[in-house]
Image (cartoon, rainbow, N blue to C red):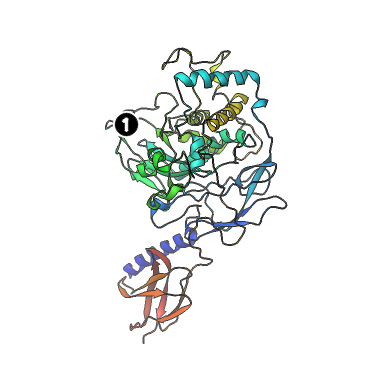
Amino acid sequence: MKKQAVLWAALAVMALAWTAVGQVRTITLNQNYTGAPGNMVVQTDAQGNLTRGAANALQNAPVPLPSPTRAGFDFRGWFTTAAATGGTRVISGANGTTFTANTTIYARWSARTTTNLSNMPSAMRTQFDWVRNTRNVCEPVMRNTTGNLVFHQIFAGNGTFNWAVRWESDDTVSLQERRRIAAMLYDGVNVWLRPLMGYADWPFGEVPVNVVGWAVRNANLIRDRQPNETIWVNSDHRSPMSGYTTGDIASAPAARSRFQNVTAINNTSGGPHLYNWPATEGGIHGRYDHYLWLTKKKNEGVVGACGSAEGGDWGFRWGQCGPGSGGTGTSAANSHATSGLIHGTMVHEIGHAFGFYDWYGGPCCGCPQRNPPGYVNQSTMMQGTYSTYAPGSSNTTTLRDYDVWQIRYYWSWIRDLQPASQTRWNHTPIAWVPSSTSAMPQVAARATQPSFRFDSRGTLKYDLNGAQTATLKIFDSRGKMVHSMQLSGAQTSVNTNLNVAPQMLIWKVESAGKVMDQGKMQFASK
């Protein structure tokens, strides 16, 4: 009887897992204005996240939600409430929003203000022109062949932007912290993009920003790992800047790196977002454009300054920043969740990924002068206070006016460097499909749980409800399997042909290694 009790307890746990997080959820997208197109429907994976949910963990790429358009308005993201404020922002991916029930989410809009460079204050125009004509000549950032600034990455990703997180720490990191980091990255990128809405020919509203995976030295550092999370466990990336004595740190696969595959992507002509990324690496939505390198040096507290940035896919490196003295980068993430603030260092370092300079004065790097005429306060550029920002706000300006104009200027600059014969800035929006069956990537849907019902003679009536095949297993009171058979089809009856003395038996049905249903039954003898 002890074995039976142990086995039944195990089955009960599996049943709880299936019931709580094992169901695909239907998510209805509502554009949320009078006269809008009909609703579009997408689906979650079995964990309730907007990911592809493939059996291979490497294919758990985020499902990019469409960014709809509306005349005279800018798209400000998807939220759980139809109201103009409040609610929760929806983020896709395993570290994003988790849905526990079928849910409707709503587009949020802000009235468009159209502007162009002719509206820029003349003093700013003078300084930005100097950067373009003088600083960029001796210390070039904007090159026609560079092809790896955030501007390029968003277009190459067809309106999406992805991160891989490199966890250079011996501390553990919780699921809640991973989700907060993902939320900060979404907000940090879109802080810079909002001034481009309604400006010139920038085609995007808010863009989906996703974390596609975490690279760690030890899998045990990832607490509460979810079945659909992609975690890379290694320490095979040699870096002289690593704080570890080996000099090796964890890294994401090179096959997922946009930077390391930029030649194959062919982001200089002809459909830049159509490169066929390997399906085993999650396809284009499993790629990463940048690393977020979260650093806590071994036996040390902080890596140099609060943060630093680098080219390629390096993204930026972030130490212990923000209120409190928690783990690497996570104290700032926790502050974001409680106070609604993006850490200024994150906004600053992401700014470098658009090509923005630090202005530290003095000759360097072949430049006799690094500050523009009339520039007197370093804090003007990518610095300052971002405390007016609250996640989900549609109307709060988060950047200083100087930086609002800076990103508009830089977009015009990099766009004009593109030869007319090339199509780097082409963009095909994700189609809006107002129907019950979406064209979005999705997992196979199950409207209800599979059903299995025995009678006292051992006849099983079942409906696999979407699964191709399954395996029925029956155990006796001692935990010994007494029968196993394959099931297929829907709304089918099958005689299990049990010849046993009357007793309580335990059964379960498995498909693709997962328990679909289980129970116990008093069977009669034949």
Residue furthest to the left: 246
Nearest the viewer among 449 and 285 is 285
Q: Identify the image quadrant of residue 119.
A: top right
Task: Give me the residue at 48% from left, 52% from top.
Answer: 51
* Secondary structure at numbered mark 1: loop
Left or right: 375, with 500 as reference point? right
Q: Is residue 180 visible?
A: no
User: Which quadrant holds the N terminus?
Assistant: bottom left
**In the picture shown, does residue 273 fall above or below 449?**
above
Residue type pointed to by label 1: Ser
Residue furthest to the front: 421
Q: Which residue is mark 1?
A: 239
Question: Residue 231: x and y, percent?
Answer: 38, 46
Q: Is residue 351 visible?
A: yes
User: Which quadrant holds the C terminus?
Assistant: bottom left
Question: Residue 214: x and y, percent?
Answer: 40, 43
Task: Give me the residue at 54% from left, 42% from top.
Answer: 426
